[in-house]
Each structure stands twice: as structure tokens, then as C-alpha cells.
Image: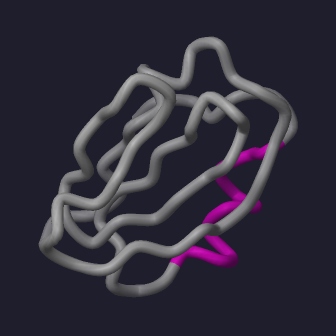
Amino acid sequence: MNTPHNMFELKDIFTVIPNWANWIAQDEDGAWWAYEAHPNQHDIGWYENEVGRIKKIGHDIQNPDWENSLTRIREK
């Protein structure tokens, strides 16, 4: 499992992750999102693939390494 960037620790994220979420990822601007289905990547973050739910779960400082933040947190 990838380690989240800076102050926003996984233990803090898990208190707000919906039980339907299978993936978490951080955008370049620091926004953390939960995804039901594997998200797609665009030039500054992640977006839903039109299958499944999405929810913003937090915000941290900008992350220049956001492309490595996608983490599977549970199996379907």
C-alpha cells in the first residue's frame, strides 16, 4: 500500500472512507478522493470512470507525486 503524502495519514483517512470505496487517490492540488471503481488518470489528478461512486474524503497540501497516490484499499 502506498503511503499518503505528508500530514494526511491513512489512519485519518479511514475514518471518513465510505464502506463502498475500493480505491483512494490524491490529486495534484492535494484533494483526496474515494472511488468505488478504479479511477482514470488525467493530467492533474484522477476522475471516475463512469462506473461506481466517488466522494471527496479530505484535502492536504499539493502533492507533486500525486501520480503514485492511487491505492487499492479493499477487494470488491
Residue closer to the observer: 46 or 76: 46
* 3 left or right, relative to 43: right
Residue closer to the observer: 23 or 42: 42
- Residue displayed at 18% across by 59% down: 49
Q: Is residue 2 above or below residue 39?
A: above
The quarter holding residue 61 reads top right
Q: For the view shown, which residue lies furthest in the front direction?
A: 43
Q: Main secondary structure of the magenta part?
A: loop
- Residue displayed at 67% across by 48% down: 31
Residue closer to the observer: 50 or 5: 50
Q: Position of residue 62 (x, y in %)?
A: 77, 27
Q: Is residue 15 magenta?
A: yes
Q: Is residue 49 above or below residue 36?
A: above
- Per the rendered image, the range of residues in magenta is 8-17
- Residue displayed at 60% across by 68% down: 56
* 25 left or right, relative to 41: right
Q: Is residue 17 above or below residue 26?
A: below
Quadrant assignment for the N terminus: top left
Q: Position of residue 41 (x, y in %)?
A: 30, 34
Q: Position of residue 36 (x, y in %)?
A: 27, 72
Q: Is residue 11 magenta?
A: yes
